[in-house]
Amino acid sequence: MARIAGYLGEGRDPSAGRWARGMVQLMAGGPVSVSEFQAGAFAAAGIGRRDAVHASGCTAIVDGAFSNANELPGGADASAAAQLIACYRQRGFVEALTQIAGDYVVALFDEEDRTLWLARDRVGVRPLYYTSTRDGFAFASRPNPLRAVDGVSKDVNRRYVAAFAGSHYRYIDNVPDESPFAAIRQLPAASYLKLDRHGINVRSHWSLADLPGWTDVEDVLAERYRALLLDAVDRRLRSARKPIFTLSGGMDSSSVLACAVQLTGTQQEAVSSVYYDKTYDESDDIKGFVKEKVSRWQSIPIEGFDLFDTVRSMVRAHDEPVATATWLSHFLLTRSVAEQGYDTLFGGLGGDELNAGEYEYFIFNFADLRSQGLSADLEHEISAWARHHDHPIYRKDRAAAMNHLARLTGPRPGEVLTDRERLARYYPAVCAPYYDLEQFTPALDHPFASWLKNRTYQDIFRETAPCCLRAEDRNCEAAGLAHADPFFDHRLIEFMFRVPGSMKIRDGVTKRLLREAMKGILPEETRTRIKKTGWNAPAHLWFNGPAVDQLLDLVNSRAFSDRGIYDVKTVNRLIEEHRKIVSGGLPRDNHMMFLWQLLNLELWFQDVVDRVPKIPPA
């Protein structure tokens, strides 16, 4: 069900004017009952932190938490909704948002001027969708309930579907105000919506400015970084009754957990997904950390599950297809955690983007060095990159670096180019009559003069972060958990976008400033580890076992063909090619991500799109 939802329709009393009718509670799935509320009231439904308050001629509802509650009217003891109303009355809605920090979605209805305000937090940790018809306006924290509103088209968004079917997952969320459904919009991160007699107006309430870089020495910046990260973790710990921490072998989740230990003076509880296949299993990297920082470590084996049944459960819980196979592991993990009574799951999302932790960020650091005329530094970094990170498939050497620079960086300062090889690899699998993906040109933002900053900015607002935050939110909601990602505290983001590239990548090692900041907090084994496995799942094996026969039956079914999305012949070829690559251990890139996206998309059509929710008359 949607955590918050509302419907604002035509008034039954003509003299009351448009938008006078109360908010109607919407629930995911059908059929459901409808509760009518007084004029301007909102519906709070489902699981999660949310509260609603009526005061000072306003009704407000908050899904999430304000991390700086002690700085807002009423202090930490006041409800977030009451604080929102107080800030609104003092400063107006937009100015109030500048004073509020946290991970939230808010709705406020001013009864005096009949104005509805909606807003989403700065990074989009929590989602919000809306739609309008001739007779009304509706919003919800999930899209499927909105499809039940009278007058809302049930059609899917063909661009979204085609991008999911035949492109890389990074490009699915390239248009921040779209949803998988044609008539349903998503409120972008850091945005607010105003609805009054003049109509709907959507604007941004926060953005990253291209401010001068810090000039302090690394030790000083590391101290400031440490203080900010500790405070970001502390603020979120205060809202947790019984927290547990996801733990991988990398720096990000380990840093969050280690900060919690530093703050509380006690070891914390942690959970990890583990695999019998060692390709993506990080158990060996985790064990040393566990001895020092963890009171109880739960390793959740991701095995023995039915792939089709699990994906069906996921897409029902998400209302959308799920971008990467990693989130299946997380989905099973959250179920196990919730059964044991934990209420908040902490994670390390955002650490890679802020600290240049992704392997591809090396290329954009090279571009910055080249543009600054630092030829010796550039050659040194390319050599260190090759020494530390060479791969039998994804080679790391000078020729590869020059090739990537030519493909991915433009001549203008900070100009990042679309990775056409990644974008269009599976275009032939999508039928052009359904949607011609060659028409799709991804938007690339260039607010900075730095290639590295623009690449990480793109990931936060248009590529990796949106789909990951949404998947984490839905998985945790389905399990009845809250979630927290301290690296996405907006103060950390603003701080890190002023840190020079040499304090993010140096000597072929990523996350340099974070490593410095975590001295004495992280175990040295974790803090100094250079190579990383990466948070992923062995989906290459999932599509090379018993599930392949099911997949082939699905792909060659009449229903699959009749959708007109995929070229069935091409898909069959890719399945067979994937099996040969994995079974033969061939040093080639397999097709697990494409097959994962195909399975999710088709089961989403079967279990969500083809089952239109209905709301019976009140």
Image (cartoon, rainbow, N blue to C red):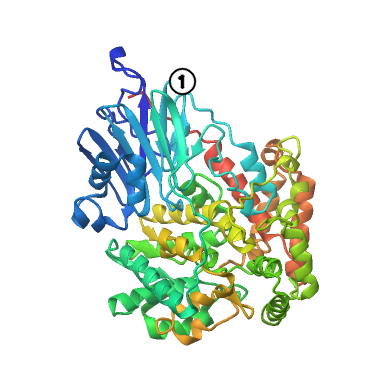
Q: Which residue is mark 1?
A: 134
Relative to 493, is 264 on the left or the right? left
In the figure, residue 596 lies in which quadrant? bottom right
The quarter in which the C terminus is drawn is top left
Instruction: Check the image and name the residue furthest to the top.
Output: 14
Residue 171 appears at what percent x and percent y?
Answer: 63, 50
User: Which residue is rendered at x = 52% and y = 59% of the image?
Assistant: 327
Count up the numbered dots: 1
Q: Can residue 341 be seen in the rendering of this structure?
A: no
User: Which residue is rendered at x = 58% and y = 43% of the image?
Assistant: 175
Relative to 580, is 236 on the left or the right? left
In the figure, residue 502 lies in which quadrant? bottom right
Q: Is residue 462 above or below residue 399?
A: above
Callout 1 secondary element: loop
Relative to 130, is 304 on the left or the right? right
Residue 165 appears at what percent x and percent y?
Answer: 67, 47
Identity, as a three-letter code, of the amino acid under mark 1: Arg
Residue 378 appears at what percent x and percent y?
Answer: 70, 75
Q: Is residue 417 above or below residue 537?
A: above
User: Which residue is rendered at x = 36% and y = 61% of the image?
Assistant: 338
Residue 195 appears at what percent x and percent y?
Answer: 40, 30
The quarter in which the N terminus is drawn is top left
